[in-house]
Image (spheres, rainbow, N blue to C red):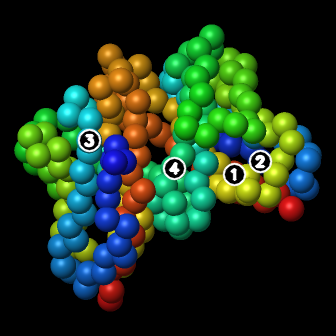
């Protein structure tokens, strides 16, 4: 079992819709989680960090963390074509390493 | 100015050549990392360093070596490049866990092609 798992996609949503990206993790001791956006050929860019159970909102982005279910999600409201990218989920494990998931490809259709 | 820089940005080399990729940062972070990314795949950790005297192997260290010359500089070497080392290489930095939650910040990447 991989430590951080994501559906590879591609996930396609129409412009203006809500995109929902999901991530599960295996290390129950993991405390911090991160969402990165990566455009093709570019470096990952941190867009959200979450440490507590519940929701964290930043503009059109909402990160959700459920430690009991070992589940992290990212919602993108009012999706735009510029949101089309690969989204990487990462978790900081109990042994002080950050593990990245394989990424989910998102395509926002105009 | 970029906080994390990598040189070169693109490199084409031949099998058997030695090559060095360099990373510099102005973020003042103690921790630095080298990753490789193959098309359609996730990030694989090659080496990481928590301070100048602390260097650790990652998941795929075979065929690679590193040098932490200073807090701000971390170099990755391929002693004898082979074609399956063709990939996109990223350097990243993060702060100490006590002062942040260990978010990693990435350089722009080096695209390496080994012929």
Helix, strand or loop for disc 4 = strand
Cα–Cα gap, marks 3 and 1: 31 Å
- In the rendered image, residue B20, in percent from the top left (x then y), is placed at 81, 38
What residue sits 25% from the left and 74% below the top? Answer: A79
Which one is in front in this view, the residue at disc 1 or the one at disc 4?
Answer: 4
Q: Residues within 10 Å of mark 1 (few under 14, many from 20)?
A: many
Which one is in front in this view, the residue at disc 3 or the one at disc 4?
Answer: 3
Q: Is residue A88 above or below residue A82?
A: above
Q: Earlier in the sequence, mark 1 or mark 4?
A: 4
What residue sits 21% from the left and 80% below the top? Answer: A16
Helix, strand or loop for disc 2 = loop
Residue, disc 1: B110
Helix, strand or loop for disc 1 = strand
Q: Nearer the viewer, residue A31 or A58?
A: A31
Image-based side of B39 in relation to A59, left or right: right
Image-based side of B96 in relation to A29, left or right: right
Q: Residues within 10 Å of mark 4 (few under 14, many from 20)?
A: many
Q: Chain of mark 4?
A: B
Residue furthest bottom as drawn: A110
Residue furthest front as drawn: A1
Residue, disc 4: B43
Q: Residues within 10 Å of mark 2 (few under 14, many from 20)?
A: some
Residue, disc 2: B8
Instruction: Assess whether mark 4 and mark 3 are in contact (beta carbons under 8 angstroms).
Output: no
Q: Earlier in the sequence, mark 2 or mark 1?
A: 2
């Amino acid at each position: 079992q991989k430590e951080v798992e994501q559906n590879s996609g591609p996930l396609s949503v129409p412009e203006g819709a809500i995109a929902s990206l999901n991530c599960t993790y295996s290390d129950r001791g993991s405390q911090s989680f991160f969402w990165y956006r990566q455009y093709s050929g570019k470096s990952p860019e941190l867009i959200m960090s979450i440490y507590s159970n519940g929701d964290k909102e930043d503009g059109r982005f909402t990160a959700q963390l459920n430690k009991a279910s070992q589940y992290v999600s990212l919602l993108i409201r009012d999706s735009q074509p510029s949101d089309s990218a690969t989204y990487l989920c990462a978790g900081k494990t109990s042994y002080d390493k950050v593990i990245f998931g394989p990424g989910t490809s998102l395509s926002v259709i105009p | 100015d970029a906080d994390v820089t990598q040189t070169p940005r693109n490199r084409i080399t031949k099998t058997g050549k030695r090559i060095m990729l360099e990373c510099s940062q102005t973020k003042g972070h103690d921790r630095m990392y080298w990753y490789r990314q193959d098309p359609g795949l996730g990030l694989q950790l090659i080496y990481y360093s928590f301070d100048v005297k602390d260097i650790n192997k990652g998941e795929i260290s075979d065929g690679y070596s590193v040098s932490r010359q200073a807090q701000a500089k971390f170099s990755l070497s391929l002693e004898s490049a082979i074609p399956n080392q063709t990939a996109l290489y990223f350097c990243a930095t993060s702060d100490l866990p006590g002062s942040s939650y260990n978010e990693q910040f990435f350089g722009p990447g080096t695209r390496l092609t080994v012929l």
